[in-house]
Every structure is written in C-alpha cells, then in structure tokens.
Amino acid sequence: MKIIDKIRIAESSGRPFYSFEYFPPKTEAGLLNLFRRVERMARLHPAFVDITWGAGGSTAERSLEIASHIQNLSGLDTMLHLTCTNMSRSDLSEVLVEAKRLGIQNILALRGDPPNGVDEWEVSEDGLSYAVDLVRMIREEHGDYFGICVAGYPEGHEECTSYQADIQFLKEKVDAGADFVITQLFYDSNAFLRFGKDCRDAGIECPIIPGIMPIHNYNSFRRMARFCGHIPAHITEALEPIKNDDEAVREYGIRLIADMCQHLLDEGVVGLHYYTLNLEKVSTQIVTELGLLPDNVSRSLPWLPVPNASRENEAVRPIFWSNRPKSYMARTMEWDEFPNGRWGDSRSPAFGALTDYHLTRLHIVLQDRLDMWGKELQSLDDIYNVFVRFCAGEIDAMPWFDSPLAVESDLIQQQLVRLNQKGLLTINSQPRVNAAPSDDPAVGWGGAGGYVYQKAYVEFFLSAEHLHTLLEIFSRNPHISFHAINNEGTAYTNCDSVNAVTWGVFPGKEIIQPTVVDPDSFRVWKEEAFSLWMSMWGELYPTGSRSRELLEHVQDTFYLVNVVDNDFVNGDIWTLLDEIISAIQTPTRTSHDLKPSVKPIF
Amino acid sequence: MKIIDKIRIAESSGRPFYSFEYFPPKTEAGLLNLFRRVERMARLHPAFVDITWGAGGSTAERSLEIASHIQNLSGLDTMLHLTCTNMSRSDLSEVLVEAKRLGIQNILALRGDPPNGVDEWEVSEDGLSYAVDLVRMIREEHGDYFGICVAGYPEGHEECTSYQADIQFLKEKVDAGADFVITQLFYDSNAFLRFGKDCRDAGIECPIIPGIMPIHNYNSFRRMARFCGHIPAHITEALEPIKNDDEAVREYGIRLIADMCQHLLDEGVVGLHYYTLNLEKVSTQIVTELGLLPDNVSRSLPWLPVPNASRENEAVRPIFWSNRPKSYMARTMEWDEFPNGRWGDSRSPAFGALTDYHLTRLHIVLQDRLDMWGKELQSLDDIYNVFVRFCAGEIDAMPWFDSPLAVESDLIQQQLVRLNQKGLLTINSQPRVNAAPSDDPAVGWGGAGGYVYQKAYVEFFLSAEHLHTLLEIFSRNPHISFHAINNEGTAYTNCDSVNAVTWGVFPGKEIIQPTVVDPDSFRVWKEEAFSLWMSMWGELYPTGSRSRELLEHVQDTFYLVNVVDNDFVNGDIWTLLDEIISAIQTPTRTSHDLKPSVKPIF
C-alpha cells in the first residue's frame, strides 16, 4: 500500500499515525537483532517503517534485503530510502526494478550525504545531481507504481544558501511527483510549525510529516543535534547537569519529546515519524505515553497479511505454517497468483525451497539451543520433555515455531502438556470456535459485526508403533478428518479434499475461509517439519552420539499427524486425544517402547 | 452424466432405478403440457428420461429441442433417441454435434421404423443401414463423449428372421460401442428373463434394462401389443370382459405391470424403463406401488443443478432467480465457465436475453390468467390483493414464480400476507437458518453430517412514495444490507459487494456458498422482474384500459427492493418489515396514495 493512502486515511479518520525509521546494521548479529526488534515494534502497529540507504558504506547492499524482509515476512509496509550518492543512473534503475519485484511500493528519494571523509558533494559522472532528479526518474520509469516521499528541512539544509531557497527546492520535488514530505529532525516544534506554514504559502500542498529524533543518550543527542538548526536553550540547560546520568537523560528525553509531539498533534499534524536509531525502548515509550497505541487492533485475517500488491488478494493459507508464517511467505514469494476464496482454484503449483538463512535462524539466535533443548539426550522421554517444557512456557523456542507458544487458555496448555508427556509431540493446534463475535479479542478477526468459526485442529509427531491405535480410534469417529505421514512418505488419510478450518461470516460479504487443511500442501510441509528435527536440533550433537541418533530415529520413524474435528458445534477433540493416550503405553526410557522392526539404536 | 454410470451406481448400491420415455407432441399445447408433466414426474426422481426421435414426421425437429429443455431446464439427465430413418450421414452428424453442444450426453441409437405408409425399410442413399452403423459413427465422431444405448428384442424383432440372429445383431451393436440395452416392450416376464440369459450366453455382458409398457386403456394396449411377440393368454382373457370399462382396465393394468416389475426386480434386474406414452398417472402409480420412490431425497445444493458436463462445477447462483430457475438456466446456458466457490471469481460477464417462448409461458398455460389475476383492476389494492391471494395459496401462479409458492411454515405465510396487504409485494424470501443439520428435511442440502445457514432475505416491489420511509428504517439497522432500484435504474444501496446468503459447512470440505446477493446480477434481474408486469399481466388488458394503466403505473414507478438481515444468529427481519408497514399509510382505493409527482392516472 502507498503510504500517502495511509496518510489520507489517518487524515479522514482523525486518528494520527506513527512510523519508525531503521538503518542497516553492519554485522550479522546486528541484523538478526534488528529483525527481532522490528518484529516486536510491529506489535505497536506503526503505519509503516523505513530503511535508510547504506550509501557508500559496506551496508549499502543490505538496505534492499532488509526492506524486503520486513515488507514480505514481517508484514509491515516498508519504505526504502534511495540516494543519488555513488549511484549511477543504471544502478538506481536496477534498485527500483528490484524493489518493485520485491513488492516494495514506497521510496524516500534523497540526494544523500557526501561519502565519509568527503566534504563537498560531487555528482558521479552518469549519476543524478539532486533528489528532484530522482523523483522525476522514478515517475518516468515507473509511473504511479511507487509512492514517493521527499525530505524537508524546517531549519534549512546545512548546505543551503537560504531557508526560502530550500522551500523552493522542496516545492520542485513535490511538483516533480513526490506524494508527501518527512522533515529533518528538530527540537523546536515552533520551527516545524512555521516551516509547515511557509511551505503552504509557497504552494506545497501535500502532507508534511515531522521527523522526530528521540533522545537516547547525551552523546548521540550531541551528534544528532548538528542536523538541526538550533537547540532551544532550555534543553541544553536541562541536559547539562544530568549528561552523565544515562537514565536521567533518557527520562528527560522521553518527557521532552512526548511533550513536543503532543504539541504537534494539538496543532493538527497527522503523523509522527520517529528516527529510532534501531533502538526500541524510547520510541515505544513515547508513542505509548502519547496514548497513540490502538486499544484493540483487529486482525483483518487470522494470519498477518503481506502488504504487497502482488499478495493483496491472498485470502487463504494452509494451516501447517501458522507457527512458521515467515517460512510460508518466503516459500510462496514467487507465486504469481494467490488463493482467494478457495484454496483449490488459484493455488500456484510450486512451493519454493526454504533457503533464507536468516529465516531459519532468526528466532533462536539469541538463545543457546543446547541450553534449551538439552546438552545430552538419553531417551525419547528427554525429547518428549522438551516439548512438555515448551508447552508449559518454560522454554521459548522450538524448531517448528517462529515465536514462543501462544496458548489461548490454561485449559489448552494443560491438555497440550498431557499429550506431549505421552509422546504426542504437538507442533500446532487451534480450538473449536462456534460463532464467536468477529471482534472477540482472542479469536476474532475481520473487524466487528461478523461471526468467526474454527474447527478444532491438532498436529503432532507420534511414534510409528502407536499409529495403528491412532488410526483405529480415528476411524471410529465420523467427525474426524486426519492425515498421517512419515518422512519417507508412507501416508494414511480419510480425506482427500481441502478442508476449511477457519472461516468467517460478515455483513454484506461472501464467506471468508482463510485457513485450510490441504493434502498437497501437507506433503510439502512434512518435508519441512521432518527436516527441522536435524537441521535445527540434531546438528547440535556430534555424529554418532546417542543424542543425535535419538533425533535421527524420531525423524526416520515417527509419523506427522494432523487431525480436524469437523464438528465445530459440539465436538470435543481433547477427549478423543485422551482416548488415544489412554490406549498407548506410556513411553519409558528403555528400548522396549520402540518397535522391534525399526533399527535398534539403544 | 452418462446413464451407464448411473446404472453402475444402482448395481453397486442395490437400489433399482426407473426411467421414463416421452415422445414429441404434435401441438404447441401438447408440448407445454408435456413439460409440465415431466416436471411433476421429475419429483419421482427417475434416473433419466428419454425422448423419442420424431423420424419422418412433423415432430422430428422437436426432439432435440425437447431433450435440451428437459436436460437444461428441468435438471434431468436426458437421453435422445436417434434413428437412421430419412437421415443422411451429415444430418446425423449435425444432430450429434448439436446434442453435444446442448449438453446432452446420452443417445439411444436405433435403426428406426420405416416411414408411415412404407412397408419395407430402404436405406437413404447417403444414410446408414443399421443401428450398429450409427453406434460406430457416434464412437468414431465423438469417442467416449456420448453414452450409447441400443434396443434389444426379447421376443425377436418383427422383421427379423430368427431370435438367434437378433441376439447376434445385438451383440454386434454392443461390440461396436453401446454401453447398455433397453428392450422392446413385453408382457411375459419370463420372455425377458430368457432373453437376458441368452444374451449372456452369447457374450453380451452389458446391462440389459427391461422396457415396460403400462396398460393405459384397452385400445392403446391392442395397438402396442403388436410390438411384442405374444400376449400371455391370461391377460387377454382378463381384459376381454372389462375392455369397455377404462377404469377397470387401468386398475387391472397397474396390478399386472406392478406384479411383472416386482418379478423382474426379484430376479435381479437393476432398473425399469417405462414407456409412458406421455401419460403420467399409471407409470407414477406403478413405481409408487413398487416402493421404489426414495424416502427423502437429499438436495445436493439449495437449487437444482443442471446435469451437464459444462455446468458440473457450478456452485454459486444469485438468489434473484430462485423462483424462476429455468430463466436463470436459460440465460446462462451459453456461459463457458460457471462460478465455483465465489461468485466474483469466475462469473461469465453476460447474462443472455430471455427468448424462449415456452419458458415465459410454461407455468401458466393451463390457467386463465384473467381468472387468476382479475378481469378488471380498479385500484392498486386490487393488485395487492392478487399478491395476497397468491401468498395465501388461493391462486397458483404469478409472473415471478415458476411454481406455486412453497412456504416453509404458516408463520411465514401469515407474515407474507400481511406485507402484501400493505403493499410490500413480495416475490422472493428465505428465512434465517443458523446451523441447521444439513439433512434437515425443510432447509437441508448437501447430504448428512454438515451444518447449513441462511441469512433472512425478502424481495418485494414497493410504491416509490414509501421509499424514503424504507431507506430511513433500513439505515438505522446495522445488520441490514439492501438494494432498491426502479425500472429506470435509479438505485439505492448500502452494499456494493457480493453477499453470501446461503452456505454450508461440511466435514473435510471447503465452505460451500451456493446462493448470493450480487449487485450486478440484481440489475439484470430487475429488467426481467419489471418487464414481467406487462409481458405477463398488463398485456391481458386493452391498451388504454384502467387495468393496464394501473399495471403500467406500477412498472414505471415502483421500486424493486431486496433486503438481507446479516445477523443470521439473532436477527428478526419480520419485525423490521413490520416497522416499515407500520410507518407507511395503508393503501386505499383512491388516488391520494399515489405520489403527486407521478402522472395522475385516476
């Protein structure tokens, strides 16, 4: 979505927005850190985020990659900065084509600072001289596809000859096709307000969004202050005595900036753009203090949609990836059509391979997997216990989950713990929901006024020796649809069609069925689900070790089972699963609970 | 669907089928009569019907038309007879291509009788000699597309030299590609059973279905008897004394044929094919006496699907034509793709014009429209009263209904009567249904094990003067979606999207939403709905008469309104409509209830 359209919505709803700017980190660890941070800040529902262009530095090539990751996998509208610095026309053209291909629809067009160590700005031979040239080039080459933002300087650009000349340059950029303006940082809100009025007087009619630089600590404040014309004396005076007390500086800064933002809001600004410097807490605290966080953000769908034009009609996903949504988004990024209404009708045939290194590592980079999952595994019970502890909330990560387990209630948590203790190693589940209001805080989606439904679903790994018991109990129950498959592909099912497991009924709409169980996708998912045993866990242990052989044994012999209770009105899937765990022997630490026909590894 | 597939289903389910044969009537009145009859007999759920080929007579060209009408508009699998008589190869080719185009998938391939007045069979110069040639030609030209039936002669063909030679001819026809056999009539069931055994001995392995000729009256029995080898003496003896008593002949005939059919069923025949001679009661009574009528036929969808390959994926229709399904089927017959899953995705853009004369006249040919709707109309109340009497079941037909009104309960009937008394002239409605079992006898469809839902829906004409009141009340109610439009196209709505108003949730399936309210289709429907005022009703009265001007006034000034209560869980559309009729003045017979701005015609 174009940011200008979001601004227009904010204008007409009277509900101000905020947005966050990040820069490309220099290290791999910093990058993973940033992704985690952006993900957490996404829960604040910024209208968009933007990624600065690492012009001339080692981080240049990173900007596109980061913008794409956030746009496509974190589900936030992302604006990419683009500067003329050190870029030829053809370089810029290439970046724009690639940005479009990646679904990025917003560009902040800048001239850019001179490279480090260079005082004077020099145009590269075949490059562009000014941001206005870049705006023109984007419009020439891509018409209306991109939303374009340009920078405004409330206290004059540092290289500029006069304030008035600066406003004229800005007007040229807007006239060339920019949709809106974000300003350079300032600490004098009156300077911004005066600038806004002067722009209007000069005929600049598009939205002008203030750029806000929070005060994180004294040193960074001093460094940043050079970008604005002046610091009001009362700020310098207030900071001077506390400049060595980081905590005091931060508290003062939050108060100061929050007051400044409130002043701007009172004067009618429609949004606030925060330069986060990749830091989380201060910006979060300011928007919280301002009372701008939406009380209860309704999900438009049960899963987080990707804000790309190519995916705007996407309305159905298989349930299997619901705990690994980034993997699903990455594996379907190349689809040219997305299912809408029905899974079967427009599904692109091929899931891509899972190749993104960050994606596979992202959610556990900060924790020692050995600490979480055991430095040594002695038995299947040790494995089962890891699942139990994850369900109990004692450990944060498992290979099959992008985030810690979100359980709807204690009741379900207890049930999951019980299943895992008995060797039904759950990796996905959803409860039965029968006509809950669509704005229900726990299970609602799609906005108010409708009703939402779910069929109960549980997915788990299970030792092959219990498969017969399971199939026997499932086949007695007419409401049950199931699939069971092992790593080799031996499969059992009683359902070869697509089963809608989440749907909603809304006023004046067709029925929406955003989550399905689909036999074909399940075969794709099982490859991923089984491979994670070794790629994420087994590889922690030396080849030939008992721990590793145990996990190989699970990968080689267990079945991945999914089960749907089709009776969403009266069904009770937990009683059914209890019946299964009553029927199977409690796993023990000795080898006799392994099927004699499988390779005896103990 | 190919009939052979239905036979295989009957074989494997152990549930015998029956089928009805009709011939093309000679007159227009006879044709309309036949259509009505077929429609009534369709409620007996025959496996298929077949239409004889009017070879050489004036009715020849009618066979295709009739077969298409029944196949496409009455929803019955229809088999077309085709004979070599008086047909060149290219004639036959053309008929086959046309039959395929019309969705007919079954052909009964016959040589045909010599034309009337001709004793000896002569092959036309470029024609075919025998049925076997026709079977070969069908297979050569259309591969497996058509199901092919051929005729068998249990007591020998009248022109044949020997019984054994006849069986050899039959074997040739089957070897050439016929799927199954229907026999010539007989009155000696042992003759049929012997024939069946002899066919098997000769290597004919396909199903052999007995052709049954009921005894309608003595004269027709004598005429028909010449087609079978012999009449058992006990039949002739029993009929002789009662031959002048039509009622006694019929009663005897029903008993006789029912016993014969029972004998055949006991011996294991899988189906019974009735030569109805276009008569209804005797065949109906026989299948009823045999206990073959299905107890409770579950509808696969809320509307009757067309059994054509081209429509086999059709899964969504607009609600507007639910009382005129034939019109919808006729107007969409040329679509090359039908909506499946969602209305919006695959809807063909253009509805065809309504041109079939039979279609527009069909349901009221036997009743005097003037008798039903009034020889003279004095006021709007007279018009309202016609609607009231239709809702009360006092008259059978209205221009907007293919069949008499089917109301689900007395309660709804009273509500409809009340609305129509006040000038909300209802032409369509459905009640709210919240999770009824899908095998509910009143509202269920789709088979057992699921849940079905409906949003309450009412559609009616309303005087323009009350439109404001209506819109005001609707706009106060957040659950209401509505459209109101007059003949000129002035329209009001609060919903521009497709609204699913009937849907079902079934085990292991995607959500099925077979009925929708669609704004685009509503504009097409309103043309039809308004035109029926004059084409079916107004034209009964002389130009310039008060009656005609009243109806013209309604056509010109009333609004067609549809309203959906989106709250299918708790909504109460009747209370809402009561609010409207409380708010509007009771119409009177004087002119003051007409809007002053419209042409005063009183």
Image (cartoon, coloured by chain):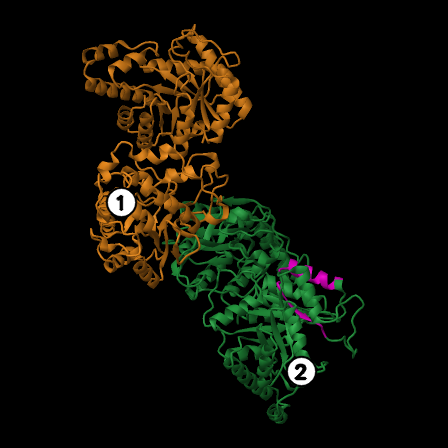
Chain colours: A green, B orange
Q: Is residue B327 above or below residue B494?
A: above
Q: Residue B553 versus residue A368: which sits nearer the camera?
A: B553
Which residue is painted at 50% across and 76% down in the image?
A292
Q: Is residue B143 left or right of residue A97?
A: left
**Residue in view at x 66 percent, y 60 percent:** A142
Instruction: Find disc 2 in the rendering and name its residue.
Output: A163
User: For the view shown, which residue lies furthest in the top direction?
Assistant: B161
- Asked if the magenta segment contains residue A94, the reply would be yes
Q: Is residue B215 magenta?
A: no
Instruction: Find the magenta span and give its range.
Output: A90-112
Where residue B593 sits in the image (x, y, percent)? 24, 55
Residue type for callout 2: Tyr
Question: Type of residue at label 1?
Answer: Val
Proximity of marks 1 and 2: CB atoms separated by less than 8 Å: no
What x and y, as percent, mark residue B43?
32, 33
* Residue wearing tag 1: B407
Callout in the foreground (1, 2): 2
Q: Is residue B301 above or below residue A585?
A: above
Quadrant position of residue B577:
bottom left
Quarter of the image that includes the N terminus of chain B:
top left
Where is residue B304 drawn, in percent x and y? 38, 39
Residue B176 picture location, percent across and down: 52, 18
